[in-house]
Image (tube, rainbow, N blue to C red):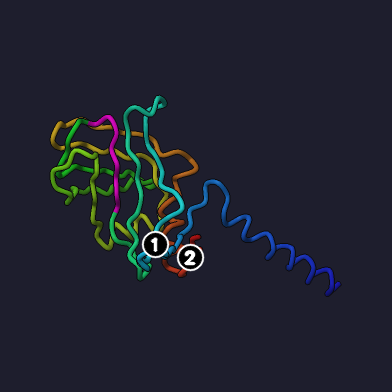
């Protein structure tokens, strides 16, 4: 009996790495550039909220500091005006609460927007799944609101679980 229990536990632990890196899983990678020795910490993937044609929307990612703390949200917009500055983001969570912010990134024509979050906003993302996100280009006032795909609704919960527990995969 004891032998069967040990075998079953060993099988469960052996499967954990496979479960941790499913296609919709988010994990943290730390990589050192062999040429300059600089260390980079980033997620294995961002997520996209866009039209089915992918001609309008945005990519959401996280800037992670080397001490494994959350830095800020990064958003890359597509089809929302040629140039932008001080853009707006509204994140609707599954429990009905909202996070709203203005980008601190100045004028640019690359579609980049960066958003700092308060401690309470970070705690919401750490614990509550996403529902919808709207990004507005405050230069052209074009916006896109989209449903977050089921596979991405727990994106930030997974990111913060990794950060809070120091779970990092070594990059190549």
Nearest the camera: 140 or 132?
A: 140
Q: Residue furthest front?
A: 35
**Is residue 8 shown above or below 50?**
below
Q: Which residue is mark 1?
A: 41
**Is residue 111 shown above or below 40?**
above
**Is residue 144 shown above or below 158?**
above
Label 2: state its secondary structure.
strand
Does 141 lie within the magenta span? no
Instruction: Report how many numbered discs are placed on residues in the image.
Output: 2
Where's the N terminus, which quadrant?
bottom right
Q: Residue furthest top?
A: 53
Nearest the camera: 98 or 144?
A: 144
From the top left corner, tell me how far across and down residue 158 is, in percent: 46, 56
Residue 41 placement: quadrant: bottom left
Q: Residue furthest right?
A: 1
Nearest the camera: 126 or 168?
A: 168
Q: Residue at x 27, y 49 (%)?
A: 99
Q: Residue at x 48, y 53 (%)?
A: 26
Please report the bounds of the magenta region as a residue range: 73-80
From the top left corner, tell me how far across and down residue 165 is, in percent: 46, 69
Residue 132 image label? none
Asked whether disc 1 touches disc 2, contact meaning CB atoms under 8 Å apart, the reply is yes
Residue 168 image label? 2
Nearest the camera: 72 or 2?
A: 72
């Amino acid at each position: 009996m004891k032998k069967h229990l040990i075998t079953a536990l060993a099988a469960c632990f052996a499967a954990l790495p496979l479960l941790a890196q499913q296609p919709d899983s988010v994990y943290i990678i730390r990589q050192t550039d062999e040429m300059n020795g600089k260390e980079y910490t980033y997620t294995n993937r961002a997520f996209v909220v866009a039209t089915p044609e992918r001609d309008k929307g945005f990519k959401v990612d996280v800037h992670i500091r080397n001490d494994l703390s959350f830095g800020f949200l990064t958003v890359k917009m597509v089809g929302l005006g040629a140039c932008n500055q001080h853009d707006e983001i509204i994140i609707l969570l599954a429990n009905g609460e909202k996070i709203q912010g203005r980008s601190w990134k100045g004028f640019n024509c690359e579609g980049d927007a960066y958003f700092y979050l308060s401690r309470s906003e970070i705690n919401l993302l750490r614990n509550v799944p996403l529902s919808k996100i709207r990004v507005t280009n405050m230069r052209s006032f074009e916006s896109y609101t989209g449903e977050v795909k089921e596979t991405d609704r727990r994106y930030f919960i997974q990111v913060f679980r990794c950060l809070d527990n120091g779970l990092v995969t070594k990059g190549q």
